[in-house]
Image: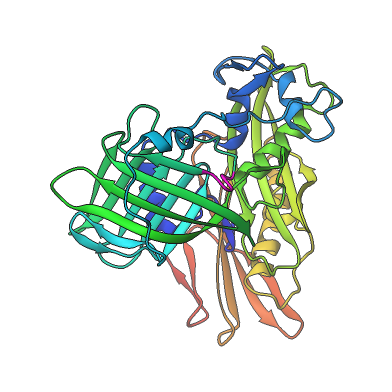
Amino acid sequence: MIGGWRQAYYPLGSFLLRQVNNVSLDKKSVVQIVILLALVGGAGVVYLTSQEGGLNLSFITDLLPGAGDNKTEPPAPSKTSAASTASSQPQPPPIPAQPAKGQVGGSPFEPDSVVLEGGVLAFVQSKEPQTAVLIRLVTPAWETPIGKRFNYAPAGANAPLVTVNRMLQGEMKQQSYGDKYTLVLEFDQEKDHKLAGKLQLTLPGEAKTSFAGTFGAEIKGFRFVDGKPDLTSDSTDTLEYLALKDLLKDDPDKKIEIVSLRDGRYSTDAAEKNRAGYLEVEYRVGQGASEIMRYQFAKDSEWKVRDKLKPNQIDEAHPVAAPGLKEAPAVLAYLAAKQLEASLGKKSPNKGVYSVNLLTRHSVKTKTGVTEASYKLDPSGQPIKTAYLFHLKQNGWALERELSAKEKVNVDTGKIEKR
């Protein structure tokens, strides 16, 4: 894995990522959600199954494009919602027409980031005290709640889970609320992957927590739009969806057990010419042996499967387009990956290579570069490390040699030192 790639399901920054992981939302990837919840026929029966056993995934083809005349759309939200009972509930004061702000735990709260992903609406304040207020909506995780209104006054059964995370004196404090709070949440229309809305939230307790106002939530993650998967979404969930679709394309009735989805990542620079992604899927068919499929993805207007790699091939050695010899650090990772793949092909021709991690450093001043590589020859094995030395020449960066275990490179001085 090299710089410019991400391997997190919540692209909200490291602070919010910790908050989401701490919420205990039991968040599954969207592909897993589709596997776990599907509307069977027209009877409105929810079909539940477990990924721990063999799965018959034929029903998932109803959620894939081109599934046929009997396509079943993703479950529609119930017409009977909190909005339908709003008139019988006490009405809170009007929501102010200003950016949402207020206080959390008695301290000022003015979120500088609002994100909607996987059914979670997150309000994040990055300045001190670092705070995240997360609202888990009672809508399908892949649905964008355009034009919907929710009124919980007070919140009772089937209300959203609201979680507050605060960094206080270097320690993370967390508290969740499932009822007895007041929430009015109104969504407007989507524009440029942002969903306008306004809210008023008051939580119970001695420490005052209440904020209100307008917001523009950045929409992230995999989702459905008009009953079809939005393949423009930058998310590992999108890659999982495409991988599962590919696994089922020849025989949608086969029983598949997804053993592991790992190393999911994609390039994040929207201005990048050759946007790429990667995902490794380990699965079993019926009671058969475990198989591994490695997918490479590319994005022009939408994400699509670009290629499939063999177990002994390294993703970084097979990019959409090879970097130029002067394009450091990308060329250092590319050349090192090619060399590592070739070396392992000779040393261990019958083994795969897993969990490859490439870290590059270089200095134009000293014309010296190094790529430190870590990899495994078994998914559950111990990491093996090596490193490659580069020098900048007239035509660009060139691989000199593999370093020994007792050598290290000081790129600032251009010298090889002892470990």
Which of the image's four quarters has the N terminus? bottom right
Q: Nearer the viewer, residue 406 or 1?
A: 1
Q: Main secondary structure of the magenta part?
A: loop
- Residue 309 visible (yes or no): yes
Q: Is residue 147 magenta?
A: yes
Above or below: residue 343 compared with residue 97: above
Q: Nearer the viewer, residue 415 or 126?
A: 126
Scheme by which the image is coloured: rainbow
Q: Nearer the viewer, residue 351 or 363?
A: 363
User: Which residue is found at the position 57% from the left and 63% from the top?
Assistant: 3
Which x, y percent locates residue 71?
79, 26
Q: Furthest residue to the left? A: 206
Which x, y percent locates residue 136?
43, 40
Q: Is 50 left, or right, of 120 in this rendering?
A: right
| Span colored in magenta | 144-148
Q: Is residue 219 magenta?
A: no
User: Which residue is found at the position 63% from the left and 72% from the top?
Assistant: 390
User: Which residue is found at the position 59% from the left and 36% from the top?
Assistant: 30
Q: Furthest residue to the front? A: 87
- Residue 346 visible (yes or no): no
- Label count reads 0
User: Which residue is found at the position 59% from the left and 24% from the top?
Assistant: 37
Above or below: residue 158 compared with residue 319: above
Q: Furthest residue to the top? A: 287
Which of the image's four quarters has the C terminus? bottom left
Above or below: residue 272 compared with residue 139: below
Which x, y percent locates residue 294?
71, 40
Which x, y percent locates residue 9?
52, 46
Q: Nearer the viewer, residue 317 or 286?
A: 286
Q: Is 182 left, or right, of 28 in this rendering?
A: left
